[in-house]
Image (cartoon, grey):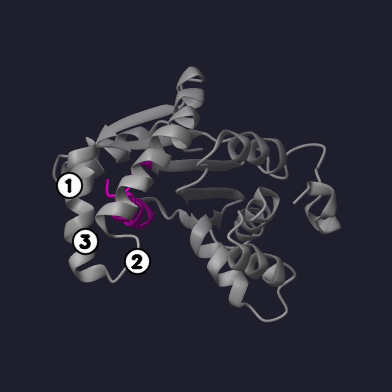
Amino acid sequence: MAANNLPECIADSKKPIFDKEQVTVIFVLGGPGVGKGTQCSLLVEKFDFAHLSAGDLLRAEQDRPESQFGDLIRTCIREGTIVPMEVTIKLLENAMHGDGWGDGKGRFLIDGFPRKMDQALKYEEDVCTSSLVLFFTADEDTMLQRLMKRGETSGRDDDNMESIKKRLVTYRETTMPVIEHYQRQDKVAKIESSSSVDEIHTMAVAAVEKVLI
């Protein structure tokens, strides 16, 4: 769907909505099964971030009465097409007007986004410049084992061998270029996630403390 067919409220803006001098945006990326959710929860508890998940926001918006995007999201899901990134980015922007603020400063952990280069560039153009990318890593065998173990109790349709392998391919082909883009800007804190939860948390805290405003 072309951007010019979207509602006017998500048309391109001339400059980012949020001032990077007042807002700390940290992208949390990594392959499936690296423990992003666990570490986000711990960082929220320590630093009082607002934790935003693009996937959760889309699912919630789809079911929200009177949503201006609900029909569009449902249509994309029904037809097997990707929700336009302008919609996802607008939902993130809307969420950033809510929790996460104190003393005129905003702190946001954005989990699992951006997954593609066009998302990264559009978000920073329209919403806010990121401060840091927390990049949790593990070898693919480790990720596979963790996800298969999780699948025993998670009930998730995508926690099976075939789906997991497809997700790993997508991660390599689309998300790694995003990581490389931010590495060239010296914004990436690479954290090996094969250590204990506490050890990983300690490394994440050290990286976050360097960029907080």
Q: Label 1 vs label 2: CA separation?
A: 29 Å
Q: Label 2 vs label 3: CA separation?
A: 11 Å
Pointer 1 with pointer 2, Cβ within 8 A: no
Residue 76 image-quadrant placement? bottom right
Is residue 123 covered in magenta? no
Dot 2 or dot 3: first in sequence order is 3
Q: Residue furthest top?
A: 184
**Looking at the image, which residue is at 17% across and 47% down?**
198
Per the picture, the main secondary structure of the magenta-coloured stretch is: helix
Disc 3 crowd rating (10 Å Cα; few below 14, some 14-19, many 20+) is some
Q: Is mark 1 on a helix, strand or loop?
A: helix
Residue 157: give x, y in percent of width and height. 34, 66
- Residue type for callout 3: Arg
- Residue type for callout 1: Asp
Judge whether residue 142 can be spotted in this image: yes
**Looking at the image, which residue is at 49% across and 49% down?**
110
Residue 179: give x, y in percent of width and height. 45, 29
- Identify the mark at residue 157; answer none if there is no mark: 2
Q: Is residue 166 above or below residue 58?
A: above
- Left or right: where does residue 12 sit relative to residue 51? right
Span shown in magenta: 30-45
**Looking at the image, which residue is at 50% across and 56% down?**
52
Disc 1 crowd rating (10 Å Cα; few below 14, some 14-19, many 20+) is few
| Mark 3, residue position | 150
**Looking at the image, which residue is at 57% across and 33% down?**
117
Q: Label 1 vs label 3: CA separation?
A: 20 Å
State the residue in front, 175 or 66.
175
Q: Which residue lies furthest to the bottom in this view?
A: 65
- Residue type for callout 2: Asp
Dot 1 or dot 2: first in sequence order is 2
| Mark 1, residue position | 198
Dot 1 or dot 3: first in sequence order is 3
